[in-house]
Image (cartoon, helix red, strand yellow):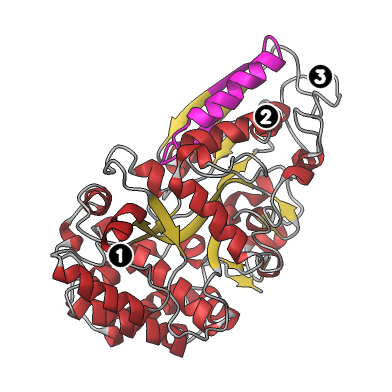
Amino acid sequence: MNIQKKTLQRRGFLRGVLAAAVLVPVAGSLASCAGGGAGSTATTAAGTVSDTNPFGMADNSTIDAVIFKGGYGIDYVEFAGNLLEKNHSGTTAKIAPSTAIAQELQSRFVGGNPPDLIDNSGEGAMGFSGILDQLEDLKSVLEAKNLEGTVIKDTLYAGVEAPGTFGGKLAAVNYALTIYALWYSASLFEDNGWTVPKTWDEALDLGAKAKAQDKYLFVWGKEAATYYQTLALGSAIKEGGDEVRLAVDNLKENCWSQPAIQSVFSAMEKAVKAGYFKPGGSGTKFTAAQAQWSNDEAALLYPSGSWIENEMKDQTKAGFKMTGAPEFTVTSTPKMPYEAMHSAAGEPFIVPSKGKNVAGGKELLRTMLSKDAATNFAKTKLAPSIVKGTVPADGFGSTALVSQTKLLDAAGSNIFTWGFVDLYGTNKDQLVVWNTFLDGKSDVATLTSGLQKITDNVRNDSSVTKIEVK
């Protein structure tokens, strides 16, 4: 899985919160191209428009799709492609993998021959500010009927349009739902009579119990040290409210010095100094570190997005009962309830306006949003898509997937997210700061100043398009 991610909801998952966090361009190219992509320059002849062919895809056409090959693989799109080929005899869906979207596709955009459908994901994804005017507005896809005959937008979870909407244009449909949680083995906790902590003080108490059994509270790997930044921000936002999120997302001066963030950093520092983090993380590959948790049970808790089960399915101890819990609060009276969740839609699918078969790109995306394709995604990836009603009560036998449903139901409208890391590409620099801190080689003050310097550098760089989050 792309280790910056999300790259990030289910029942009632972003009511009000993400709707209030719509990205508003305040400088640079985004502001000038909000209405771009309205006219397609597709070269494939048009077909007959109907409910079963709403975009007029031509008969016997070929669809060129390039899909980021990360933790979700590409087989879920291949499944949809096979379904499309059955429904449109003579049509071929060519699904190609990529691990470096921008690097591999930049020349095709420049040359005017981009693919028809792209999963613009991964560490090497293309920045939307540079390609927005070259993308189709995908509202037409959500307004079309799905394969079952229902208008697609009526089958999706609330708020899923927000992450892909820029200046009123739906430039991307984010397909996968990600929740960020603290993951643990329910069977290990049951065997030891442990209770999942709700506050950082309770977490420190559990760390002492773990240490008494030669285990650790946490483990980390060098490429994923910023998973603890995600945990820290989730805790701080629940403790201090929306203003904490907005200050960091909008690159405010001294945003990392906010009291809620500092209180979480201090609690985390106590855990580091007490030896509750397994040593050596800065020199350990992140998947190896995760296996120390999921296979060796050397650590009790691991903060991650919900891709973690699929990512570690071959390195998880039998009977582990992987389960997610909300991120800790600092006190028992936070501004947001303990049940509040950090969740976001990820895997942004885009349709370039200069693709040879724009209608085909949209038709493949429409097929992915069918119940059959979305159910296949949930079943094979152990993660929900943005399509409602595709995860059964037993979660296809996945305790992690069942827990995601319960967590999002409990959170209700108390769902939040942020986007500055992916938006401004700060993860690489932040990894250095966090690895040093988790290694015990720096303190809270150093961590804070290091993160603030990264934020200030972005804010003060006039060449970077800034996005105001509301």
**Residue count near mark 2 (Cα–Cα under 10 Å), binned few <14, some 14–19, many ≥20:** many
Q: Which residue is drawn at 26% across and 81% down?
A: 269
Question: Quick one: 142 or 207, which is closer to the camera?
Answer: 207
Residue 307 appears in the picture as rendered: yes
Question: Quick one: 419 or 243, which is closer to the camera?
Answer: 243
- Residue 403 image position (x, y, % from top left): 49, 53
* SS at badge 1: loop
Q: Do the residues labelled 3 and 2 touch (CB within 8 Å)?
A: no
- Residue 400 image position (x, y, % from top left): 44, 49
Please tell me whether residue 286 is drawn above or below residue 96 in the rendered image: below
State which quarter of the image contains the N terminus.
top left
What's the mark number on residue 47? 3
- Residue 23 image position (x, y, % from top left): 65, 65
**Identity of the amino acid at label 3?**
Gly
- Quarter of image, res 129: bottom right
Left or right relative to 428: residue 103: right
What's the mark number on residue 367? 2
- Residue 350 image position (x, y, % from top left): 62, 41
Q: Residue at x 29, y 43 (%)?
A: 316
**Identity of the amino acid at label 2?**
Thr
Residue numbers of the magenta segment: 66-94
C-alpha span from label 2 to label 1: 46 Å
Left or right relative to 135: residue 279: left
Q: Which of marks 2 and 1 is in front?
A: 1
Residue 76 located within the stretch drawn in magenta: yes
- Residue labelled with disc 1: 193
| Label 1 or label 3, whichever comes before in sequence order | 3
Q: Residue furthest bottom?
A: 259
